[in-house]
Amino acid sequence: MLEHSFQCPYCWEEISMLLDSSVSKQIYIEDCEICCNPIEIHVSFEDHELTSFQALNIEQ
């Protein structure tokens, strides 16, 4: 597991989450721990190294 910090696309607060590096490509929805809005998370790993991370506002 890898801890990763990023800004919420709604409230702009910095939040962190644990990412599972055993799955190379992931897309899922996670609620912001501050404002509770749903964030679409896109994550890619290569050889257990984080290569891409996006936290998207799904209410655009």
Image (spheres, helix red, strand yellow):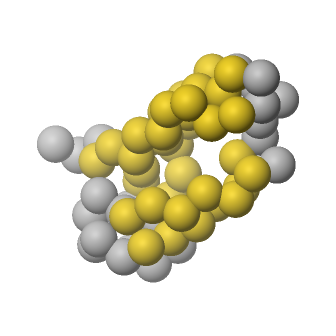
Tell whether 24 sits left or right of 41. right
Residue 26 seen in this snapshot: no
**Which residue is at 70% across, 59% downward?**
3
Towards the viewer: 10 or 46:
46
State whether residue 50 is above or below residue 17.
above
**From the viewer's perspective, is residue 42 above or below residue 59?**
above
Q: Judge left or right: residue 22 versus residue 51.
A: right
- Report whether 4 appears left or right of 53: right
What x and y, as percent, mark residue 38?
42, 53
- Residue drawn at x 56%, y 30% as measured from the top left: 51
In the depicted structure, whether residue 24 falls above or below residue 2: above
User: Where's residue 49, x and y in %?
Assistant: 70, 34
Q: Residue at x 43, y 73 (%)?
A: 14
Quick one: 47 or 11, which is closer to the camera? 47
Residue 9 visible, this orientation: yes
**Which quarter shows the C terminus?**
top left
Outermost left residue: 60
Question: In the rendering, at what x and y percent does residue 45 appear?
Answer: 66, 27
> Residue 46 appears at what percent x and percent y?
69, 22
Residue 8 shown left or right of residue 21 in the figure: left
Q: Could you tell me how many numbered marks the image carries?
A: 0
Q: Residue at x 50, y 70 (%)?
A: 15
Question: Foreground residue, 55 or 38?
Answer: 55
